[in-house]
Each structure stands twice: as structure tokens, then as C-alpha cells.
């Protein structure tokens, strides 16, 4: 056994041992300490109202997430995929979308769902096992969650090809994880997007892990560089900096709308929780790493900035916290009450035009179920 | 009345053209379907007339074709994907099985998937590996898909239009070795429903079921059997999912014997499902078990051995004999 | 004699360990199988003991896992691939169907494919979409593959070792909801052959066939039926390709009635093939058609509806009643 | 319909309108006019014998190819995939291999097969429909042809992982076409190769077309750049220059053997014939293009060079031509005589351990076939 370099790989800057100073090439507009900094390429100019709105969304989605994790522990959800630590990446990206744009999430974009106006209970119903997400993708501009890793990136690209054909000035935002970048379909999506110059932006939350696999297993070079091989720009942004994420995503979506084709955004962030509630991250990562990332918290820095700049006072912060608690209470109340639809509905939307054999199966099912009525 | 003599391939071409004229949302996608008109020329001339936005020469990746088709469908388009040969559908199977087939149910009917996947299928053309496969059972086993296998120019012409106009995903199987067979097609007729089987020859002794390329084989067998005084009823199944077995059940109740023919491997081929269902429905009428004539359970062999692999007239008659001898 | 009480999951873990000890060419590959030990911990501790060269945490792509497994096999290795959940095998289906299954025939036996594809399969664990699928029929329909579905710790322990030691590709299906069920395993016994079915409970009235997670369900049904004076013979099929129907034929010739149970969609599920074959073999002994109890022909429903989707004791008994009533 | 840029794409340098002067970044050691030139990075120092051997191989494989095309037209083959125009890419790459290296071809690498010592009749048998290629992959270090586009790139990568595990100092050469670069599996192969630093070299013959699809449909940027997105080097070589191909491939294989991981080589060439004998390229490409590429012929330039340098005389060239004719005659003779094996052998190598049901099917088949003996 000579040269088996399975773990001896080039460090991805900032992945293995994250340090507080931002990486070169990392777009940042708000430091972990809450300082506004300038970037040569990207800028945002937000009103205090807009900044407070961002803060509010960050806090609310985190509170919802915490409640969901608790509900799972209490047996009210089958599973929960926490967004903890990725709030800024999601809220920032979602705020860059216009109403007519379309987002294609994975299974973790609760923060995007929130900003798009999806009722949290529709997300909860999926994780409770009641349905696969009950929101309206057209009304919200937010597609259903896709669990098969990467499949949605092709959907997003095809949808963007439809936007082109409609002559519309909309753009499409495709979410994916760092692990997903290894799927063939994701690479095909980038090839398609490049070939047709489709108005789609690939938004990759590099949260450093695909379950237990560290980013180094998927790529030896920073992920954002992948795009150049396909002939379009890639950019790495501090995923815990909501302002930078918003700026970078806005620019990319604008370019897409203007016919300049796709962009790949790597939002450099960290999954502070487990992969899902079924996971045990202590088996594959060190507590130290988490401690370092805690210092880069996406909410704390905005809070410091707002407070420091006098754009928000204690009353505001308390108000948001109260709102968050109310949201959590509503989520809890709604979740525990959710019941699955009548079982026979599983036959009803398999096809738009029901088939005779399936209609017959449905009848058989209903008759069979009825045979138990009163008996047990 | 416009009746034309068309090959099956040309009937598909005209059907696609008409579907594109009828609905501007119809978009064709595939490898080499534009400038080349497809390796079988089924899309010949369509890119010239409808432009590159509606007849899309794609990059070389079948998952990409199907995955982007899903996205186009979500945006209100009706993508018609060509898979160049049966053996190359497998890279797209993830999108077909986990996405195309499930999205309607996943969204509880909010999102529909009017996607057609055209696949030239089956053997008999002396081709190299992967060009002679019969993958229908994979799709017919997958809830959420509809599967059609046409056998003649009339069904090809209407079927492709019906599949495209319908709201559900359809795997549309084209019997490639019959692309050059001709028939009269009445272009203004009222078509039969897409999802129905059809008795194509009446008979009393044994019911023979076939679809796609094997319908002709079954009819040849019936002709030969007639010469020996044996009367075969031949049913063209036309649709494999949903299966329309009503005419078959009626027939088998009368004949008491049934033989199913297909090119796909016999194990878990369509014949398995049909045998199970027919036996259940016709148990007391059956004089013999439903017998299956299919490809052997081996990878499709090299071209110069395919004649021994494929069901032919003799193998159908052999099964008929066995059914009669039970 | 080393007899241990093992869960099915632990039995697999020990079986893998023993296979790796026995043959240094055995390499495990998959997502999260190393440091994490797999999401079900089936490979727990193996990377620590055998190193990263033999227990490979792969990038996240199933085609990549299977495709590189083919290459490793061509180099003389025996790759054992873990697919994290049943619903994620589809990206690998192109490699499995067009390559793994065909290479032996393609090379006329010069190249063999001792590749094992481990798939935790089936529902009943309250999971989200794509985590409860039963894809066995896709593989059993594919010539060139062997397909095994274990139901208990003893078969798990031996079966995984036999599958790995064998010269042909095996899709090895693990009943995920039974991972935590326990049994005594004699670690030094002489195992039964891998490719054989087995009568697991004797009976006279109806033969009930099952495999994987449904064996337990069938046994529960038999127990319940016994309480009502009805005697069911239960056969654990164990192997789905090749199917070993000899014990089944013998049983059905005696009972005259047969019910097949699986979670997969009933249409073109294993039950279809079994019904067709049993009917052919036992035509004159059958008192009723072979009846199938399977998943409904719908995409696997959300977790809180799965109880109504999955065959259970009552549905098996219902089919038994119908078989008796014919 | 606004911005549908399906054909309006950035030119890939040299693809749409090839011109004789080499492209910047294109490694070349022998110009189309037969002049030796130097490259800053790559060199070869070949003896006259070696140069003549290259020439001989180029001529022989072209002659074989011509004969095969003729045999197909005469109905003796079901199909033929011509290598015309790609001789230098294939012969050059193959000469870079050591005996213990392994090559994974597509369906067009007859030139590589030849150099690896595969009997041309074994290739012919595949295209005649007698078998799927009867050569021994282990003995020849040349895997069987793979028709499913791109599948072999993963096999090559896995094989290379096996080489690593064996501690062997061999390398693997994976062939692929320009069209294949769009397949997800090919991109996965590159991701795997990078992640494990596997000793595999991806050798892409960019012959400008995937059947009818021009390279611009697959990529808007030169293909060799794809590799950098995955974190390993890519290089573009004049695929019609056998010396440059040999030099570049040798260097890449050496790097792989030394544990430096994969390289992607784009051999910039042109398919002078149809895609296969079933194809009609007049439907999608202009005669002009072919005329330009004729001036870059891979054989002519080496012939000019050999003659000019006095390394070969008329007798040598005549000798090679005679050898080529003899080869063609042997190929023809062998091909027309080839018969398929007995039909029942189709049951025999599906499994290494035959299964009882298949054995029973075989018996049934044999009995059924026997029932016709004497009857027709
Ligand atoms: C095709 C497929 N394979 C495997 C899985 C199982 N799985 C679920 S999430 C996950 C890791 C995803 O990692 P990443 O893309 O980085 O996203 P993250 O979970 O970190 O947000 C895996 C392997 C899956 N859902 N789909
Ligand atoms: C998966 C798959 N899809 C489609 C095909 C049909 N097909 C055969 S060759 C070819 C084009 C390949 O182009 P390229 O990779 O550039 O190689 P070339 O033929 O030019 O050598 C296509 C589409 C195939 N063999 N496999
Ligand atoms: Mg991740
Ligand atoms: Mg090409």
C-alpha cells in the first residue's frame, strides 16, 4: 500500500481550520465583529428599515428552527434538517430575489421559504410526515423541497430556459450544498446553463460537510472555482454575512436577467447543528471547529452593527425576540395538531388523469378499509 | 379527407409537427434532433420550421435532458424528449423515476408533469450493444408514469399527439425496426383513445397479446396458424401503463388460452404482470396457464445472434402449441 | 461454538468484518461509511480497523461509487458499495444496468464483476420521501444481476459474506426496518447456500411467500391464522434473482393456494413474476389464482400514511381469505 | 422570444473556423507543414526508428480504417466508427503507455487498440456483430470498448484507485470524446480522480463534433479548462501532431505514476469522416471546414518531416504502404469469414456461476432449436 492520499489533501482555505480573518477572495461586507467593510466589486446600500428587516428574518428563522428541533425530539416531527448557522446565507439570498423570480431549494432552505412567504407550517408538515410540503410553488416563487441530491439544479436550469422562451426578465436561484457539487446531475446543470446562457444562479451553501464528509472529499480547490471550468463566473462570499450574500446574489441575479448567463456562488458557511436530527456529528467533527465558527455567528454581527450604528435599540431587539417566541408558539401549536389527509387521497394525485386500474385499486382500498369499521 | 400513406417514422414526424402547431408550449429536446433531424430522422425539418428555441439540440447527457424538461414543464412548457436509443435512457432514470414520476403526487396535484419521453426501442436492426433494448418494464413498474408502445403508423401519428397533449408524463416507445413500415393514415380522423388496447385480429383458439414491434410478429403467427386451421385472436396492447386488459379478459374468457409476446427479458417483463392479472381475472376460464414468449434472460446478444434471441413467428406458434397441449 | 445474539445490523457489520479479514481485496465504498460508520452504522468501526484504503468515504455521487467499483473490480478488487437509502440508487442505475450487469457477458466471461451493492430498502420507519423504496424488481428484471433480500440476522451475517465471496454482481437488499431485530447467530456454522428459498413455517392451507421485511409480517399472519384454525406455510424467498421456486412449487402443489407479499408496487413487482411462474408450474394444482399483496401503485406516501400503504398482517390475511374463497 | 442564444456562443478558438497557425495555448511540436518546433514545456526526443514506427502505425491504422469503412458499405460490418483524422491523437497517446498501464477506450480508439497489440479482427468482430470485442483486456492493457458515453471514465478512475491500492507504478488512460464531457458520469470521474489523486489521465479527443452537435453546444470555453475547476491541470495539444500528443501524454502519465494525480488532455483534432457509417455529416457541417482540416493532416506532416530530415526514403514509404495493403487484405479476409458463435453460448457467460433458471432456459432453447433440425 504505497500512496493512498485519501485524507492528505490540499487544505481548502478556511475549511479545515477556520480562522477569523476573512480568506482572500471571500466577499465580505460585515465582519464577524460587526464592522461594515467595503468590497471592490460588491456593494449594498440598505436603509435602516431594510437592515432591521434582515435582522428580524434571521432571528425568526433561527427561532423557528430551534422550535422544530425541539418538536422533533418530542416526537412531533419524524426528522428535522436544521439551518442553524446558515441563516445569513439563506436570508441574504432570498432577499435578493424579486417576486417573479423562482427559487429551487434543497431540503434545508427554511430561511428562504420564510422570506418567500411560505407558511412555516407547510414546511413542518413535510417533516412531520403529513405531506411533502404543502405550499404553492407558483404563488410563492419557491419550488417544493427536493431530497434527491442535486436533482433540483437541473429543474432550475430548465425552468430558466422556460423564462428565456417566455422573454421574461426573471431569474432563477438554484440552491445546493457542497456535497451536491459531486453529483453528475449538478455538473450537467452547470453545463446546460452555460451552453444556453440560462438565467440561473447556482447558490451553493458550503457548510463544510455533506453529512460526515468534509468538503475536502468533494473538492481539493475552492468550490467557486468549479464554475470557471464550465465557462461562467464563480464567486465565494462570506455566507455568514447577510449583507455580502445579498449583494453578491443580487448582482448575479441581475446579470442573469440581463442575459449574461449563470453565476456560481459559494456561500462559505458552517452547519452549526447536526446534519439532521438523525445524525451524530460528534463522530466526525471536533468541538473546536464549532467553537471557532461560533465567533462568526451570522446574527450576532448584524446585531452589533445595528446597535452600534444606532439603527436599533433594545426595544427593537426585544420586539423581534417576542415576535420570534410568538412564531415558535404558532409553529408548535400548528404542528402538533397536524393530521395526515385521508389515506385514500394517496391515490388521487398520482396522475392528473386518473387511470382505470388505479381507480379500481382505490375502490378496493376504500372497501377494504371500510371492512374494519366498527370491528377494531 | 386527407389520407396519406406514411411510414411509422414519417407519421411520428407529422404528429410532432401537428402537436407543435397546435400548442406553442411544445418544445422538443434531445441529442442531434435539430440540424440532423435525429438519428432516425423523426424530427426531420422541425428545427428549420420551428426554430432552435422549440427544437433544442442539447448537450450530450440524458439526465440533463430529462432534468431540464422537468423545469420547463414547471414553467408551463410541454417538453418532448428524445432518447437516442433505448440503451441510453438509463442515465436519465434517476430524473424519470424520482422526479418526473413523483412530482404530481409530491405536490398533491399542484404541479403536473406533461413530459413525453420518446424512446426508439427494441432490436432486430443488427445494431451494436445498447441499441436494441426493451426497457418498458422498468417504467411500467414505476407509479406515476404512463407507458405507451405503438405498433403502426396510425397509432404513431395520433399517439404522439395525444401523449403530448395529455397532462401526465408518458414514456412513448417507438418500435424502431418498424419505422419504415407503411400504412394509410387518415390525418383528419377522430383518433381512438391513447390508453386502450385493441383486438387487431379476431380468433377463437388462443389469445395472443403483443405491443410495439411484436404486433406484426403476432399477426404473422396468426396468419401462419390459420393455414394450419388454428384461429388466434391478436390484441395490440398499445398501452402498458395503464394496462387496458378489459378486451383481453373478454377474449381469454372465450378462448381459455393466452400467450404474451415481447422482446424484453421474460423475467419480470410485461408478460409477468399480464399473466398474473389475467389469471386472477379469468381463473375459471383458463384451459392453460398464460404463457410468455420473451427475450431470454440474458443481456441482448451481439447482432448476429439476435435472431435467436428475439421472439419470432415460430416461437409464438410454439407457445400456442404448448397452450393448446395443456 | 461461538453463538451470539445479534441484531440484523450488527450481523451485517460482523459479516462485513469477516469478509474483509478473509480477503484483502474486499473494499467498502460509500457515502459516510467510514468515520460515521454509515447512517445505519452497518460499517461501524471498520474504517478504524481496516483503514481508509479499504473503507472509502466517497464523494457524494452514486454513479461515481458504482462506476469506480467496476474499475476496482476490473483490477481484481471486490468492491462492496453502500447505497445510503433505496431511493438514491437511481443515479447509479446506468452503471448497474449497462455496465455491472453486462460486463461478464460482454467480455464472454473474461471479465467478472464481483461487485456487491448493499441497499437498505423498504419502508416502515417513518422517513421522508425516497427513504422507503423497494426497488428490487428493477434489478431482478435485469439479466446479469443477482438479487438477494435477507430477512434475519443469520442470513444477513452469512449472506453478505457469500455475496462478497461470489464471482457475480449481487444487489444485496437489507430490510432497514428490521436492522434492530435480534436473533442467535452461530458464527461458525456452515451456512445455507445464498441462492435458495426456505420454508420457514410449515402449513397446509395456503403458501405465503415473502422476502426481506415482509417475512416477519407473513409469519405474524401465519400465527394469527393459526389462531383461527387456518394453516399457512411461509416461504422466505431469500433470493429474488435467481428465484428458487422449487420449494414453492412443492408447497403449492400441496396447498393449492399461494399468496405473495412485498412492499414494492404490486404492478410488475416480484409477485407478478412469481404468479406467472407458479401458475405455469402448478397449473393443475391451483385452487385459486396466485394472489398478490403489495404496495399500491402510487409513489410511496408520506410517513404518516405509510401504514395504509404497506402490506400488514391484516392485508395478508385478507388475501388468504380471498384465496380460500375462490 | 427574446434572448435565445442557442447558437450565438463564444467561439471556441479554432473550432468554428480552424486556421493553420496553431492556437495560443495549443501544444505543438510538428507543424502541419512538417516543421519541428519547440514547446516551452513539452519535449520528445525520438530516434529515427521510433519516428518511423509512429509513421508506420499512423498509416496502418488509417488503411485498416479505410478497409473497414469499405467492408461496412459492402454489408460485411453492421457499422463502423471511423477514426479518420484522429490517427495521431490515438497513436501518439498509445505510444505514451507502458505495458503495465491500462487504457479505457470508447468505441473509436482503433488506433490505440492497434498500438496495444489488439488484433484488428477482434475489433472487426464487434462491428460485424459477432461479439462485443474478443480481445483480452488484461493481456493487452486495453479494456473492451464502451458504448455508453462516458461510463468508461469512471471505470478508469476506479481501476486507477486499484493501482494505488496495489502500490503499483502504473497509470491509466481514459479516452473520451468532446461530447462525453457533458455526461454527469464523466464529471464525477474527474471529481473522484481529483479527490483520490488517482493515477488516471483523461484523454479527450475533441474532434469538434458529437455526432451533429458542435463542440460549442457542450462548452463555451476550451475543454481543457474544465479540469481546473476540479483542481487538476488541463492541457490542449494539437491532436493531429503525433509528437506533441506523445509528449504531453507521456508527461501526464508520468505525473500520475508519481502520485501527482490526474491530468486532462484535450487533443484538438477533427473527425474527417462521418460519425459512423450510419451518419450523414452533410446535414450539419460544411465542406469548407473539412478542406481546412485536410491541410492539417496528421500523417502528411510526419511524412514530410521524415523525408525532409532524411530519416525515411521512398523505399520505406513504399514498404509501409505495402504492409498497409497486406494488413487491409488480412482484415478483409478475416472479417468476411467471421461467424458468430453457436447461439446457445449467449447463456454461458451471463454469470460466472450459472443460475438454475438460466441453465433451464438454455436447455429449453437448445431443445427448441433442435426441434427444427432437418425441418427447415
Ligand atoms: C442522490 C442522493 N444521495 C444521497 C442522499 C443522502 N443524503 C442526504 S443529505 C446528504 C448530504 C448532502 O450534503 P450537502 O450537499 O453538502 O448539503 P447539506 O446537507 O450539507 O446542506 C446525503 C448524502 C440523498 N439525499 N440523495
Ligand atoms: C449515454 C449515451 N447517450 C447517447 C449515445 C449515442 N451516441 C453515440 S456516439 C455519440 C456522440 C459522442 O460524441 P463524442 O463524445 O464527441 O465522441 P465522438 O463520437 O466524436 O468520438 C452519441 C450521442 C451513447 N452512445 N451513449
Ligand atoms: Mg453541506
Ligand atoms: Mg466528438
Image (spheres, coloured by chain):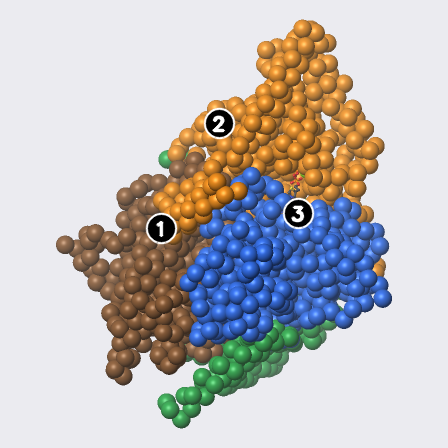
Chain colours: A green, B blue, C brown, D orange
Query: Depth-wise, is mark 2 or mark 1 nearer the camera?
Result: 1
Residue that mark 1 sits on: D356
Q: Is residue A72 left or right of residue B144?
A: left
Report whether residue C285 is seen. yes
Say which of D124 and A171 sits in front. Answer: D124
Query: Depth-wise, is mark 3 or mark 2 nearer the camera?
Result: 2
Q: Is residue A359 left or right of residue B9?
A: left
Say which of C264 and A169 sits in front. Answer: C264
Q: Is the C-beta separation of discs 1 and 3 under 8 Å?
A: no
Q: Is residue B225 above or below residue D17?
A: below
Tell me the tag on residue B60. 3
Q: Residue at x 64, y 36 (%)?
A: D79
Residue at the left extreme, as displayed: C1
Same chain check for tags 1 and 3:
no
Instruction: Report, in whole angstroms, how far the alpha carbon at label 2 lies from the one at label 1.
Output: 34 Å
Q: Residue at x 79, y 56 (%)?
A: B5
Measured as percent of width and height from the top left, residue C99 is found at: 50, 45
Q: Residue at x 69, y 76 (%)?
A: A139
Measured as percent of width and height from the top left, residue B140 is found at: 55, 64
Amino acid at each position: 500500500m504505497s500512496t493512498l492520499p485519501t485524507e492528505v489533501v490540499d487544505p481548502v482555505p478556511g475549511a479545515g481550520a477556520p480562522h477569523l480573518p476573512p480568506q482572500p477572495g471571500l466577499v465580505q461586507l460585515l465582519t464577524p465583529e460587526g464592522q461594515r467593510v467595503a468590497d471592490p466589486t460588491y456593494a449594498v446600500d440598505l436603509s435602516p428599515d431594510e437592515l432591521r428587516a434582515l435582522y428580524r428574518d434571521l432571528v425568526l428563522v433561527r427561532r423557528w428552527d430551534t422550535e422544530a428541533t425541539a418538536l422533533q425530539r418530542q416526537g412531533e416531527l419524524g426528522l428535522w434538517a436544521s439551518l442553524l448557522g446558515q441563516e445569513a446565507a439563506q436570508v441574504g439570498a432570498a432577499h435578493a430575489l424579486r417576486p417573479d423570480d423562482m427559487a429551487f431549494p434543497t431540503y434545508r432552505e427554511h430561511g428562504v421559504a420564510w422570506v418567500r412567504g411560505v407558511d412555516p407550517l407547510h414546511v413542518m408538515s413535510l417533516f412531520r410526515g403529513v405531506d411533502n410540503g404543502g405550499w404553492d410553488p407558483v404563488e410563492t416563487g419557491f419550488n417544493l423541497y427536493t431530497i434527491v441530491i442535486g436533482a433540483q439544479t437541473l429543474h432550475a436550469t430548465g425552468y430558466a430556459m422556460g423564462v428565456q422562451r417566455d422573454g421574461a426578465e426573471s431569474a432563477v436561484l438554484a440552491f445546493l450544498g457542497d456535497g451536491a457539487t459531486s453529483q453528475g446531475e449538478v455538473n450537467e446543470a452547470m453545463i446546460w446553463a452555460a451552453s444556453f446562457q440560462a438565467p440561473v444562479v447556482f447558490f451553493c451553501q458550503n457548510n463544510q460537510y455533506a453529512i460526515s464528509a468534509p468538503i475536502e472529499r468533494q473538492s481539493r480547490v475552492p468550490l467557486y472555482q468549479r464554475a470557471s471550468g464550465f465557462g461562467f463566473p464563480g464567486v465565494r462570499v462570506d455566507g455568514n454575512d447577510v449583507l455580502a450574500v445579498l449583494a453578491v446574489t443580487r448582482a448575479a441575479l441581475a446579470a442573469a436577467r440581463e442575459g449574461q448567463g449563470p453565476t456560481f456562488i459559494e456561500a462559505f458557511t458552517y452547519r452549526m447543528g447536526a446534519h439532521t436530527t438523525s445524525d451524530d456529528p460528534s463522530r466526525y467533527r471536533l468541538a473546536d471547529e464549532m467553537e471557532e465558527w461560533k465567533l462568526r455567528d451570522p446574527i450576532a454581527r448584524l446585531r452589533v452593527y445595528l446597535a452600534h450604528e444606532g439603527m436599533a435599540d433594545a426595544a427593537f431587539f426585544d420586539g423581534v425576540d417576542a415576535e420570534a417566541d410568538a412564531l415558535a408558539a404558532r409553529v408548535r401549536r400548528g404542528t402538533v395538531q397536524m393530521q395526515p389527509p385521508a389515506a385514500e387521497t394517496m391515490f388521487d394525485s398520482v396522475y392528473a388523469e386518473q387511470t382505470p386500474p388505479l381507480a379500481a385499486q382505490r375502490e378496493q382500498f376504500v372497501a377494504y378499509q371500510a371492512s374494519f369499521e366498527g370491528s377494531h | 379527407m386527407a389520407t396519406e400513406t406514411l411510414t411509422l417514422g414519417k407519421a411520428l414526424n407529422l404528429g410532432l409537427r401537428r402537436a407543435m402547431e397546435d400548442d406553442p408550449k411544445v418544445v422538443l429536446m434531445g441529442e442531434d434532433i435539430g440540424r440532423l433531424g435525429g438519428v432516425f430522422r423523426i424530427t426531420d425539418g422541425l428545427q428549420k420550421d420551428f426554430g432552435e428555441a422549440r427544437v433544442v439540440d442539447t448537450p450530450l447527457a440524458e439526465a440533463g435532458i430529462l432534468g431540464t424538461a422537468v423545469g420547463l414543464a414547471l414553467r408551463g412548457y410541454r417538453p418532448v424528449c428524445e432518447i437516442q436509443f433505448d440503451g441510453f435512457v438509463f442515465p436519465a432514470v434517476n430524473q424519470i423515476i424520482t422526479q418526473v414520476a413523483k412530482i404530481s403526487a409530491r405536490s398533491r396535484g399542484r404541479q403536473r408533469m406533461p413530459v413525453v419521453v420518446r424512446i426508439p426501442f427494441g432490436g432486430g436492426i443488427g445494431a451494436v450493444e445498447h441499441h436494441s433494448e426493451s426497457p418498458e418494464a422498468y417504467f411500467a413498474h414505476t407509479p406515476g408514469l404512463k407507458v405507451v408502445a405503438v405498433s403502426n403508423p396510425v397509432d404513431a401519428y395520433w399517439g404522439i399527439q395525444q401523449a403530448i397533449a395529455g397532462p401526465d408524463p408518458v414514456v412513448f416507445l417507438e418500435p424502431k425496426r418498424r419505422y419504415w413500415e407503411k400504412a394509410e393514415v387518415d390525418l383528419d380522423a377522430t383518433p381512438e383513445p391513447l390508453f386502450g388496447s385493441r383486438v387487431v385480429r379476431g380468433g377463437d383458439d388462443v389469445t395472443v397479446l403483443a405491443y410495439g414491434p411484436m404486433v406484426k410478429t403476432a399477426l404473422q403467427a396468426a396468419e401462419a396458424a390459420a393455414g394450419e386451421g388454428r384461429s388466434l385472436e391478436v390484441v395490440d396492447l398499445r398501452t402498458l401503463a395503464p394496462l387496458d386488459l378489459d378486451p383481453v379478459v373478454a377474449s381469454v374468457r372465450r378462448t381459455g388460452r393466452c400467450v404474451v409476446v415481447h422482446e424484453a427479458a421474460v423475467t419480470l417483463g410485461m408478460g409477468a404482470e399480464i399473466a398474473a392479472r389475467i389469471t386472477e381475472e379469468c381463473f375459471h376460464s383458463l384451459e392453460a396457464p398464460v404463457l410468455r414468449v420473451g427475450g431470454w434472460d440474458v443481456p441482448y446478444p451481439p447482432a448476429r445472434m439476435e435472431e435467436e434471441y428475439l421472439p419470432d413467428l415460430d416461437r409464438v406458434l410454439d407457445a400456442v402449441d404448448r397452450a393448446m397441449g395443456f
